[in-house]
């Protein structure tokens, strides 16, 4: 089994993100806009530099590359619920009506 440093893994993840973005034929700026993060954050992710997990997940959602994350979902969350959440289409809880 090969062991990679954190820096090497971040670099590989960034290369995968870049590959998916280019495969969708969108710019870094467009990906930033779709993800709701800054252009600098997208550049950091693609370069394997310091970024937040929140930014990384937002980018993955925008690129529709979240399948691998399902294995890390909380056990009480179904795969369908997880996939809806990652697509950003989770249903909001409705407040109970006072009217009976």
Image: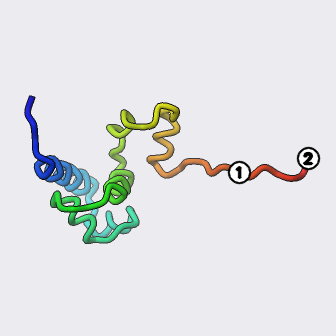
Q: Which of 66/49 is in front?
A: 49
In the rendered view, would you say 28 is above or below 81? below
Q: Are marks 2 and 1 in contact (CB under 8 Å)?
A: no
Q: Secondary structure at mark 1?
A: loop
Q: Residue at x 9, y 37 (%)?
A: 3
Residue denoted by label 2: 100
Residue denoted by label 1: 94
In the rendered view, would you say 79 is above or below 60? above
Q: Residue at x 15, y 60 (%)?
A: 47
Quadrant occupied by the N terminus: top left
Q: Which of 63/5 is in front?
A: 5
Question: Which of the 4 image quadrants contains residue 32?
Answer: bottom left
Q: 10 Å neighbourhood of mark 1: few (<14), some, or many (≥20)?
A: few
Q: Position of residue 22 (x, y in %)?
A: 22, 56
Which of the two labelled residues, at mark 2 and mark 1, occupies the earlier sequence position?
Answer: 1
Q: How is the image coloured?
A: rainbow
């Amino acid at each position: 089994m090969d062991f990679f440093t954190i820096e090497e893994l971040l670099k590989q993840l960034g290369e995968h993100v870049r590959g998916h973005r280019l495969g969708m034929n969108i710019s870094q700026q467009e990906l930033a806009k779709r993800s709701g993060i800054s252009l600098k954050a997208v550049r950091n992710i693609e370069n394997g530099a310091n970024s937040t997990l929140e930014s990384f997940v937002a980018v993955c959602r925008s690129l529709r590359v979240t399948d691998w994350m399902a294995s890390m979902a909380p056990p009480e969350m179904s795969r369908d619920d997880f996939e809806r959440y990652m697509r950003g289409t989770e249903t909001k809880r409705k407040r109970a009506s006072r009217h009976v």
